[in-house]
Structures are given as C-alpha cells and as structure tokens.
Amino acid sequence: MTIEVGDKAPDFTLKDTEGNDVNLYSELKKGPVLINFYIGDFGINCTTYMSKFIERYDLISGQGVRMFAVNDNSLDSHKMFRDRMGAPYPMLFDDGKKVAKEYGAIVGPGHMVSGFTNREFFLVDTEGTVRYVWRSPVPKVLPELDEIAEGIKKAL
C-alpha cells in the first residue's frame, strides 16, 4: 500500500519518548501534522540531516504545522537521540514498522537497506487528508528543507 496526496491518512497511536500515547487524529484537532518517517537514530545520514532540520525547523513550525518523527527504533534510542540532537518535536516508536507499512514508507527490494523504514514525509490536514508527500528513492537521498517547506506552503 502507498499513500498519495488526496488519500485519507491512516490513523495511528504510537508512544513518544515520554511514554505517552500520541494519536494522529487527536493531534489533527490542534492543526496539520507532518509525519517524518526516517531510517534510524544515530546513523550518520540521519544525524546530519536531523541537525540541519532542527536548525531550520521554523520553516515547518512557522506555517502552523507540527511534526512527528517516526521509526522503529526503541523509545530509549529515540529519547537519547532526541536529547542529544535537541529535537523540538516528538519522536514516535513504530513497533514492527506497522505504521510505516500502512503508509508505504518501507524501502523496497533490491536495495541494501530493503525492509527498513524509508525517508518520507506526509503532510496531513485537520480533516485527515494527505496534502503533500515527499519520498526518497532510497534513504540516502535527503530532501532540501526549502523544498519541504515550499510543498507545505502550496498544500495548505
């Protein structure tokens, strides 16, 4: 399954680094959400990219959008990564990659990291409709932050 612009976003409830349940549709009552799937905590690409993303997070938050970073690393790993990086957004534990699979955010066969969570972004509006999608062909390919911000601006 692959989620596209115009599709209804699959609802989910995942734990954050504080052990709280985060439910997508409940969060949408507060405003649009950008779901950021990524391959893992502490990897060189993810660490470098997250550092740049955190520095320019205002491009996202300044548009009234909140972000959740999602992958299947443990809550302890997420907490250490978030604390080390100073991430201003929640990191959610996707046990067994269930949510990534629902969104189609899994690296396909034929890649060294086949089966891992891919680097993908989904902007979900307050009605639960996907308004913007960015997908990496492989997790090493990183989006330009200006491109993500512009995509959000056009979608809202």
Image (spheres, helix red, strand yellow):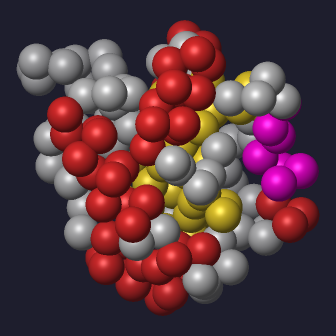
* Residue at horizontal 59 percent and vertical 83 percent from the top: 62
Classify 112 as above or below 134: above
Which quarter of the figure is the C terminus placed in?
A: bottom right
Residue 129 coordinates in the image, percent (x, y) = 68, 63
Compared across the picture, whether 100 is left or right of 124 comes to left
The span shown in magenta is: 21-27
Magenta stretch: includes residue 22: yes
| Location of residue 142 by image quarter | bottom left
Compared across the picture, whether 60 is left or right of 119 comes to right
Compared across the picture, whether 32 is left or right of 148 comes to right
* Residue at horizontal 68 percent and vertical 79 percent from the top: 64
Classify 72 as above or below 68: above
Magenta stretch: includes residue 136: no
Given residues 142 and 115, the one toward you in this image is 142
Residue 42, visible in the rendered structure: yes
Classify 83 as above or below 19: below
Residue 135, visible in the rendered structure: no
Residue 96 coordinates in the image, percent (x, y) = 54, 11
Residue 34 coordinates in the image, percent (x, y) = 58, 59
* Residue at horizontal 50 percent and vertical 87 percent from the top: 153
Given residues 125 and 77, the one toward you in this image is 77
